[in-house]
Image (spheres, grey):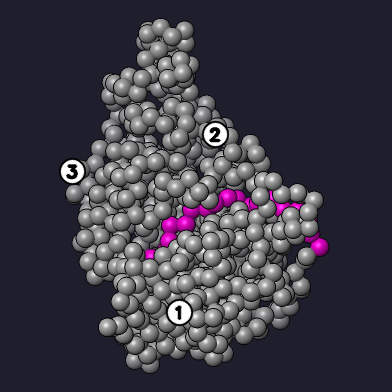
Amino acid sequence: MNKKRIWALQLQLLTLVLVLSGCIPASLLSQYPETDMMPEEVHFERTPAIISAEETSVDEKNLKQLIVGISTEPTGDFATPYWQNNATDNLINSLLTGYSTYDISRTGEYVLNTTAVEEAVITENDDGSKTYRFTLKEGLTYNDGTPIAAKDYVATALLWSSNQIAAFGGKPDAGMRLVGFEDFRDGKTNVFRGVRLLDEMVFSFTIANEFVPYFYELADVSFAPTSLEFWLGEGMADVADDGEGAYFTGEFAELRAPGEGDDPSSDAFQRFNEIKGYVLKQRNVTPRVTSGPYQAVSFDAATKTTVITLNDKFLGNFEGQRGSIQDLVFKKVEDDTQFDELRTGTVDLLSNLGGGDEINAGMDVVEEDEVKIDFISYPRAGYGKLMFICDFGPTQFIEVRQAVAHLLDRDDFAATFTGGYGSVVNGPYGEGQWLYKESKAELDSKLNNYSYSFDTAITLLEQAGFTKNADGSEYNGSGLRYREMEDGTLMPLILNWLSTEKNPVSDLLVSKLQNSRDVAKAGIRIVQDQVDFTELLNWMYRDTSQGEQYGVPTYHMMNLATNFSFSYTPAYEWTLDDNLIAQGYNPNRLKDQQLYELSRNYSLVDPTDAEAFRQGWVEYIVRWNELLPEVPLYSSEYHSFFNAKLKNFVVDDTLGLEIALLYATLE
């Protein structure tokens, strides 16, 4: 018999631990043909006047605008994470999105969003699946005044799980744990069985039995509304349900990617490209139709600046919080001038700084004027890393990856970069994560710390087969090593390394790894190329939509950093499925059955069984540490420095900037 629990919003709030899916981008900004299918003009009641430092004296406070300096340049893509997951773009998009069925509290919990949802009914089905049925409240609208109804929530699950988005180069994974997801995503059926449109204000999502239990279950049914008219154009699609599941109607429902043998001049081929071009263009359109506390005003590609302003039609988050800072400006800053900008007021907030030099520079600014400048700090839930691509060249061999780790004194590296505001970690985690805090002693006893050892590195390189000279003779102890491959060719031990420009971590890797005497003595040559971050991601994801050259395996390693949400789980991060890898999952391209199973399954425990979840996570970390798809470089203590006019600003390892800014004030 079905077991039902009815949660009336007047009676209680449902809380559970926060999760944000580990979304790995499928591609960067896709090229698309110009099209006459331009969106209709969207009208808003207010366009903010952005006040520059030149218009405001140093001592005068602008209490309507906060300028946030960011180190990761935005791309102007407001569709994260379905094509890419640039940290700044993702932050801004979070502020534009609201009315999720479950919202995020300041204590890192999911709570039923009583502002949007009238009632939630949970049914445990006989087949082991689990259904969440939601009834919406009346009066919700988008920022342009268009009413929000049940079909807008259903549209989110359909659109961002669809085969059409995959055909446009995206990563459609919104409903990946719902019943019927794979068949719907792969285009085998037009009906998404786990998504139901039940009435004008009633809809449901059913989690597949293979994902019940799941430690972060509420993430699977936390959906916000999506305007199909904005994304697809007027009359292109609608949502219907005949009793078996929701589906698209209209031209978009029948849209399929052309095959290799299709005529590019055919009407169907050209129409596909027109619709694709329209959708891809909508990723960057400002202003745009959104549902969150803020609405987009503009993005300036030249200055890397995004402006958003309060949405006066937003009714609030789960507890009615609407935000009070009128305008937020996100602008790219440079390391060597960011604190000058903080001093002069051209920037009000520098968030999540992790390098020792910049933290010390920030503390100097605070010491200069403690009344004007303030700061907060907290341990980072993330780490900096040297990432290996594991499907070609020398880094396909585990021993080479391990040897590189042994040739870098990571304790010295972390101490130098963080200036004492951080430490070394030995896996994909940061010191701020609760799992690490509760497992530190166990991890210390089980993980290889890959301490600096030239002799160990040499042994590993020999085990990997790099025992030849360039002429095929046995390695004589000097110069570049080679490995004789099965076809008789010789593979040189050359590691092509891609890094970003003006990056202090890259500079430190040059001195402590690339130019290390022991690296050369070991028979390794590291060749560095420098690009901007967007270009690096193109190579990392082999994004051929940006150019065929990116599809050619070229770079063996890249340095960047990763932050984790409070309850991130790598369900598909180490997938073995080539189709998913092509969409952007498993960018390391390391295929290991045990790693995949451990990473996918450790979260499949009851939400109340934290110890089983922790134990499974430790097993996953141990296997990761053995395979070493990345060399962890440091986990830093984050510092945020800001103009003291910013009050009630609280951010930590579980509370992101998108929530902190909603509660902060200017005084």
Task: Check residue 445 in the rendering and tell me which mark sits there, or answer none.
Answer: 3
Q: Residue at x 47, y 57 (%)?
A: 23
- The residue tagged 2 is 553
What amino acid does circle 3 point to? Ser
How far is mark 2 from mark 1, CA to CA? Answer: 43 Å
Q: Residue at x 35, y 32 (%)?
A: 398
Q: Secondary structure at mark 1?
A: strand
Sort mark 2 into few (<14), some (14-19) or many (20+) by Cα contacts within 10 Å: some
Write the start and end of the magenta stretch as one range.
18-36
Task: Check residue 204 in the rendering and tell me which mark sits there, or answer none.
Answer: 1
What amino acid does circle 1 point to? Ser
Q: Is residue 186 visible from the viewing direction of this image?
A: yes
Q: Assess whether residue 28 is covered by the magenta stretch.
A: yes
Q: Against 116, is 495 above or below?
A: above
Sort mark 3 into few (<14), some (14-19) or many (20+) by Cα contacts within 10 Å: few
Quadrant housing residue 461: top left
Q: Secondary structure at mark 3?
A: helix
Which label's residue is closer to the chain start, 2 or 1? Answer: 1
What amino acid does circle 2 point to? Pro
- Residue 117 appears at what percent x and percent y? 46, 85
Which label's residue is closer to the chain start, 2 or 3? Answer: 3
Q: Against 346, is 244 above or below?
A: below
Sort mark 1 into few (<14), some (14-19) or many (20+) by Cα contacts within 10 Å: many
- Residue 524 appears at what percent x and percent y? 43, 21
- Residue 323 appears at what percent x and percent y? 53, 78
- Badge nearest the viewer, 1 or 3: 1
How far is mark 1 from mark 3, CA to CA? Answer: 46 Å
